[in-house]
Image (spheres, rainbow, N blue to C red):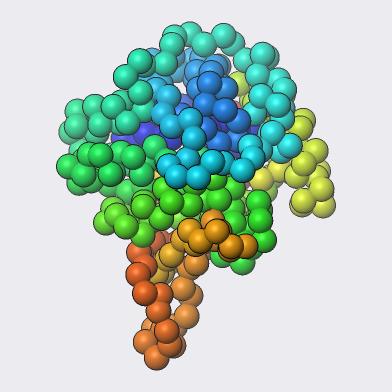
């Protein structure tokens, strides 16, 4: 069956593509989907995840809802101006009704159950704020060695998308991101904006997906508000599929080219709050320079075969 995977998500249009990518890939075993606040409220992200799995014919995948807010400070705003009022361009009702309910026990309990039951270490793809993953690692340190890697869509090295320096997932809960990326000793792959924006897809790619079958048509139907927002950012008719880039790496390790760097998360209350400080100085420059005083280490995804990646995602989510 292949690699075992848990997705922690806040759907979200690009989350929708990422969930479909994993749900329709037969070389990965999607053990569960856990939801977190983020692009929209937790009840919305949860119902969107359930509907997306129903669309993909994967009602067998258990879903559980997790954190409805950040660990410490309130989330300043959702991303409805990008993903639409319901997180799916106002079109979530084109998706099938959820085929089952979310598990009562909640996201952290489901993750613990799935990690402990698995006969090999599991990959976690974290494509929303990192609150659930931070809570998991804080409350259940024994599961650390049940996790092979945490592949995180988040951060921006050169710039953010929510503030000048902060990317949305990290900005939504910087303390959680710091717990996972800096405080914990679990292998992390960070897939930042610097790469996900380069992997943006255009209208020709979306037209191929729409023509591929009912799942492709339904996913494409979720994009109007998101496309309108990205048209302004990218300057062409297309969209970033941030989260699907991270899930591609979770499914096929090495599809993205990574490099290991010290990393810190700005948890101050100043203008840098939520920034991912990736120390790209050379070893000698770092050795003769200052700090960072305390930093984790992450494998940061900086490059890929852009068309190969787009074809990989298109080929997989066209299966239905
Ligand atoms: C990230 O923020 C969310 O809006 C997207 O779903 C993605 O996970 C991109 O910054
Ligand atoms: Ca997301």
Q: Is residue 1 visible?
A: no
Q: Quadrant of residue 291?
A: bottom left
Task: Name the spot of residue 97 as percent of width and height, x first.
Answer: 57, 9
215 versus 183 height, above or below: above
Q: Quadrant of the N terminus?
A: top left
Q: Quadrant of residue 117?
A: top left
89 versus 242 height, above or below: above
Residue at left 43%, top 11%? 101
Q: Nearer the viewer, residue 209 or 228?
A: 228
Task: Name the spot of residue 71 as percent of width and height, x first.
Answer: 43, 42
160 versus 39 height, above or below: below
Residue at left 52%, top 32%? 37
Residue at left 80%, top 38%? 228
Q: Left or right? Give the position of 126 relative to 303.
A: left
196 versus 270 height, above or below: above
Q: Is residue 67 visible?
A: yes
Q: Nearer the viewer, residue 107 or 148?
A: 107
Tally the numbered discs: 0
Q: Nearer the viewer, residue 189 or 69?
A: 69
Task: Name the spot of residue 215 as percent of width and height, x first.
Answer: 61, 21
Residue at left 41%, top 21%? 63
Task: Name the spot of residue 207 as percent of width and height, x first.
Answer: 74, 32
């Amino acid at each position: 069956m292949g690699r075992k995977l848990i997705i922690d998500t806040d759907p979200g249009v690009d989350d929708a593509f990422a969930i479909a990518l994993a749900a329709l890939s037969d070389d990965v075993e999607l053990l569960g989907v856990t939801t977190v606040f983020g692009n929209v409220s937790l009840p919305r992200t949860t119902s969107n995840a359930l509907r997306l799995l129903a669309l993909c014919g994967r009602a067998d995948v258990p879903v559980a809802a997790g954190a409805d807010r950040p660990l410490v400070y309130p989330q300043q705003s959702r991303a409805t101006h990008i993903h639409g009022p319901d997180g799916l361009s106002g079109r979530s009702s084109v998706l099938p009704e959820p085929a089952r309910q979310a598990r009562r026990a909640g996201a952290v309990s489901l993750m613990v159950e799935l990690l402990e039951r698995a006969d090999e270490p599991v990959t976690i793809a974290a494509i929303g704020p990192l609150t659930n993953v931070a809570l998991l690692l804080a409350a259940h340190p024994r599961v650390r060695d049940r996790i092979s890697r945490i592949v995180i869509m988040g951060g921006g090295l050169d710039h953010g998308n929510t503030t000048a320096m902060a990317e949305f997932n990290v900005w939504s809960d910087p303390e959680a991101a710091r717990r996972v990326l800096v405080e914990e000793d679990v292998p992390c792959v960070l897939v930042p904006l610097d790469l996900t924006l380069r992997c943006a897809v255009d209208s020709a790619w979306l037209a191929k997906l729409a023509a591929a079958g009912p799942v492709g048509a339904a996913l494409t139907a979720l994009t109007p508000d998101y496309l309108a927002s990205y048209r302004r950012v990218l300057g062409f008719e297309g969209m970033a599929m941030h989260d699907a880039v991270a899930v591609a790496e979770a499914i096929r390790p090495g599809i993205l080219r990574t490099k290991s760097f010290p990393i810190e998360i700005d948890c101050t209350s100043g203008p840098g709050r939520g920034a991912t400080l990736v120390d790209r100085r050379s070893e000698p420059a770092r050795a003769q320079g200052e700090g960072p005083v305390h930093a984790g280490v992450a494998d940061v995804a900086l490059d890929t075969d852009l068309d190969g990646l787009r074809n990989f995602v298109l080929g997989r989510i066209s299966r239905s």
